[in-house]
Image (cartoon, rainbow, N blue to C red):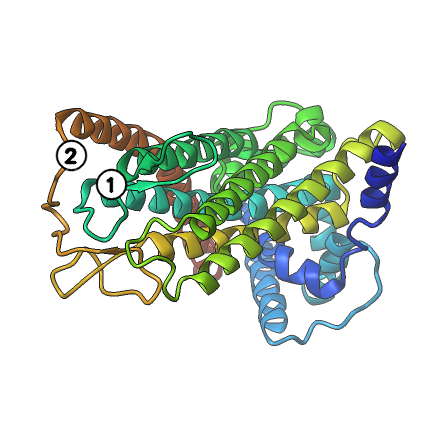
Amino acid sequence: MKTFRMLDDVVHDAAPAPSRESLLRHYWRYLMRIDYASTVTMAECGFLSLEDAALSLNALRGIEREADEGAIPDEGAGDFVDEALERLARKAGAPLTDRLKAFRIGLDVDHTMFRMALKDRLAVLTDALFDAASLVLAVARCDEAAFSAAIPHEASPEPIAWRPYLFGLFDMLMRDGDRMTLAMRQIDRSPMGTVAAPHAEIANPRERMAELLGFERLQDNVIDGVLAIDGYLAVQSALQTMALALNRLGADFMRNPPWTDRLGDRAEAIQDLQSQSALAARKAAKVIVVIAEAAVSTGTIRPDAAAQIAGLEAFEPGLRAVRRFTALIQPTGGENGIETASPNGLLSTTAQKDSFTLTQDQADIVEANRREAGLASLRRHTGAVINRMRWADQTLAAAVDGLIAEPGTTGKR
């Protein structure tokens, strides 16, 4: 009974309804991108005249400027997406806004914003994690003069040699990266149009919308588009597992410092690593429990606004933890070192960036090379996601500029 009481406390002490400021901070730019992309696509497919498209895009730019200046009042409209459309109607006219409403439905927009925000944060975190893993492998190749020959560890009756410890650490980070990459593939599907398409006055060109919003492919059906929770849970689970791993590494470093000069001034940095990773793990765990409880008790199988915001905010301490770990493991040294000196750096070495001083035997070289190839393979996917998002931003901006500057052309490729 105590276990269920504790679970119940977590559920009912979950994130409160998000504030307007929180919604703006997390979702505003994604909502604007959806409205820009919808207007461009409507013009390209002939559902909106070029003159009306230019009028709508200019109105959207005005709303965006107001938001940047903090000049959007709280109008108490309730629904965040509908409120944005009401502002557009006042600037561009109700008939024009009604056509935009007919082209898309708020439920589509809600989940598309969430996926865009989630994917952006996951891509940044995964890329930072791969940076850390790459650095761990680089340190494993370097001169070990700054390290103890072996590290006492509770998991082993004998101290663990430093290089095998680093290989194990690298493998653990790679498993986290693998889980994040898999989760990213699950959410990199555009739900835009899964609800609206069957009811739209014209065929919704979902492929073009997905392209302009930076998604790899379309979500195939309405259930997966706006109701399925497996992708969201996979993201939070991967984040929680990574945070717990980093927290454990902090504990390892604190109990058994691997440096020959022991902790030095690194204790505060390690404590911060543990604090941020613990916070990320707890936030992600709470989101998982809240979504699961809502699903089994009320039949609600999609995260509400509070769960969405809580899930997005779990990434902030997670990213800080990864960056703190990277700073701790960062090689340091003189002007010929791998990187410039860091006050919390782990390794003191004169190894060159492109010519490490290898001291391991041939088997270790083979192991390092194998791990490096695996890292490169995983990084290709994350790099493709980031490049696709950048390309989508540039393509959408060019299409918007083309329609505003020359209403006689659509900007279509």
The circle drawn on residue 270 is none
Q: Quadrant of residue 103?
A: top right
In the image, what residue type sits under mark 1?
Answer: Ala
The one nearer the camera, 187 or 172, is 172
- Out of 351 and 379, give the one closest to the viewer: 351
User: Is residue 104 or residue 156 the one in the foreground?
Assistant: 156
Could you tell me which residue is drawn at 48 percent across and 61 percent down?
404
Mark 2 secondary-structure assignment: loop
* Tag 1 residue: 140
Q: Position of residue 395 (x, y in %)?
A: 41, 49
* Location of residue 305 in the rendering, given as x and y in whole percent from the top left corner: 75, 48
Give the residue at x 52% y 48%.
121
Q: Quadrant of the N terminus?
A: top right
**Element assignment for label 1:** helix
Q: Which residue in the structure is indicated by mark 2? A: 360
Task: Tell me the kind of residue under disc 2.
Answer: Gln
Tag 1 near tag 2, CB within 8 Å: yes
- Snapshot quadrant of residue 345: bottom left
Neighbour tally class for label 1: few under 14, some 14-19, many 20 plus, Cα within 10 Å: many
